[in-house]
Image (cartoon, rainbow, N blue to C red):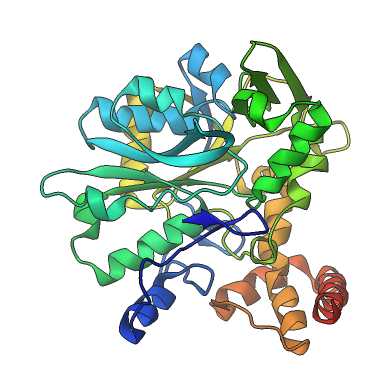
Amino acid sequence: MGYNDSGFLRPRPLSEPTTEVEQRILEVCPAVNVSFPENEPHYHETWGPIRVLLLAHAADDALRHRASSGGALSAILGRLIEDGSVDGVCQIGADPELPVGNRSVVSTTLESVRFNSGSRYSPSAPLRRLSELKVEGRRFAIVGKPCDISAATALSRRDGSFRTHFPYMISFFCGGIPSIQGAAEVLRQLGVEQNDVAEFRYRGNGWPGFAEATTHDGTSARMSYNDSWGKILNRHLQLRCKICPDSTGESADIVCADGWHLDPGGKPDFSEHPGRSIVIARSELGEKLLKRCIEAGDLLSSGTSTDELAQMQPYQAKRKQLVLSRLLAMKICGMTTPRFSRTHLLKAALRAGPTANLRSFAGMLVRAWRRQRS
């Protein structure tokens, strides 16, 4: 994997793939195909499979503060390692050679999980090491973006031994992955040279925390989440992220997200609070794991509902419900679109209503027409 001219990670083939290999790649690549869980009795048209829905945070106060949104995801990973359910966790951590970038790491201790906690808003490839980790008798949890988990799920359907090696798949709500150029813009606005950066955190050390660059001489500069994500990073997304039908990790066993408090107007409040996460167990395996975490005291939890979820995560609800209208606009403009389950997307679109879908369709039609002309 390597960065292209736009600052996104792309595959760099070691040799020209055969037609058969290329077909296998296309069958599992989430840029081309996204399949939703089939025949799932707990399926919600907007939020996907929901067996358990909670608000939770790590019982460990230090982890709760360090992680991006209350440390629930990291606490769950810690439980898997501590009780021996897995030998390690495939996750993402900061790249020491490019602190604003990411690298794939395998955490085998609680300390490593804690060290690598926190959101990383730049391109990542957590599945790049799966082949070397498929060793007899060893088991790993995978933590990845919804598209990574979709790809891993597709692989598991074609490889009967996949879940033997990778029994747990954990994800999070994703707003899209910015180009590495987004991080460069954050640094420019902080007045920090990229070569001077020794450590860079996109979030954490509070909730939502700050984007913070620490230089080799120990000085630091930081920017609020609302400014870093809201005004810079989310403007560096690729088109594929903007039409993602599965930004909530529907194929994962457990998925976590920010459980934002609401301001007086009923909108998400991004001011600093003690961190908390939305936690959804999607599979029977995930439900059992979540129960273990609560019983062991790793998580402190309380109940919530899908109505509250829609208030805390309005952008995610809107994205799923309006994807179909955007895909139709792209088709009309002759653009190639990924293959998604139209049945699931139609049900989600009906929740948004005709007015919202018409506006979404018109907006994408204009953007697609401009893209075709440029």
Residue at x-position 74% and y-position 76%:
325
Q: Is residue 53 above or below residue 164?
A: above
| Residue 324 visible in the shown view | yes
| Residue 210 visible in the shown view | no
Relative horizontal placement of residue 341, taking residue 142 as reference (left or right): right
Residue at x-position 62% and y-position 60%:
46
- Which x, y percent locates residue 56? 52, 29
- Which x, y percent locates residue 223? 77, 26
Residue at x-position 59% and y-position 29%:
68
If the image is split into quadrants, where does the C terminus sit?
Answer: bottom right
276 or 25, nearer to the observer: 25
The answer to which image quadrant residue 220 occupies is top right
How many numbered marks have been drawn onto this rendered protein structure?
Answer: 0
- Which x, y percent locates residue 264? 87, 31
Relative horizontal placement of residue 236, taking residue 1 as reference (left or right): right
Q: In this view, does 297 lie above or below 218?
A: below
363 or 54, nearer to the observer: 363
- Which x, y percent locates residue 105? 38, 37
The answer to which image quadrant residue 357 occupies is bottom right
Residue at x-position 38% and y-position 79%:
22
70 or 54, nearer to the observer: 70
Relative horizontal placement of residue 9, taking residue 26 as reference (left or right): right
